[in-house]
Amino acid sequence: MNSIVDDDVYMRWTQFGVFSSHIRYHGTNKREPWHYPAIAPMIKKWWKLRYTLIPYIVEQSRKAIASGAPLLQALIYHHPEDKLCWHIDDEYYFGDDFLVAPVMNSENRRDVYLPEGKWINFFTGERLEGGRWLKNLDIPLDEMPVYVRQGATIPVYPDEVECTDEMDLSKSTGLHIGPHFKGIFKN
């Protein structure tokens, strides 16, 4: 139990944590990224993304408190009429705008179902029509399938920080996921 987990497990759980209400590495084994030198730079990229998304997480958390709705939601929550969504248990909404499809295998492949609507890949800016499956996607270790509803405005933190103590949330801005959005790392 005290051994270091495989790099791919550490990376995939980090990615999941970024799109969750809380991110924390639990366990009795070594959990700090410097124990994973081959992937430490990629981990830092994902942590930076997490800090960028803190205003969105705060906004969605406030909605959750007011409504009682969870921050992570099954697809059926938003698409009760779509019978396929009733059976998909490895994708979820993160708040109202993100559709997240974690990779949970060492083959770095997965199918992704996009419910009805217009979706934009959060990382590449690729635009996709929903109501269909994306089959057998090859997902490199430093990527994860994350889609955003077209037209959404995501509150983000514009400055790079090392911890939330350095944040002044009044400086948050809105990232519009519209026709000119080219992906979070490309805008």
Image (spheres, rainbow, N blue to C red):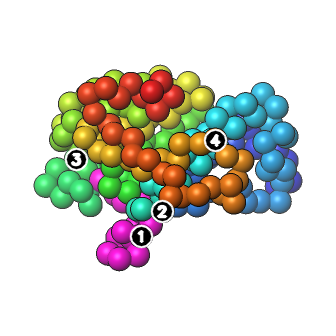
Whether 158 is among the magenta residues is no
Q: Nearer the viewer, residue 182 or 95?
A: 182
Residue 167 in the image: state x and y as whole percent: 62, 55
Residue 67 to residue 79: above or below: below
Residue 69 to residue 181: above or below: below
Answer whether labels 1 and 2 touch (C-beta < 8 Å): yes
Q: Amino acid at mark 1?
A: Arg
Answer whether labels 4 and 1 touch (C-beta < 8 Å): no
Residue 118 in the image: state x and y as whole percent: 21, 36
Element under disc 1: helix
| Identity of the residue drawn at 44% across and 66% down | 61
The magenta-colored residue range is 61-75
Q: Nearer the viewer, residue 45 or 23?
A: 45
The residue singled out by tag 4 in the image is: 160
| Distance of label 1 from label 3 (alpha carbons) | 30 Å
Q: Along the polypeptide, which appears first: circle 4 or circle 3?
A: 3
Element under disc 2: helix
> Badge 2: how crowded within 10 Å, few (<14), some, or many (20+)?
some
The residue singled out by tag 2 in the image is: 58
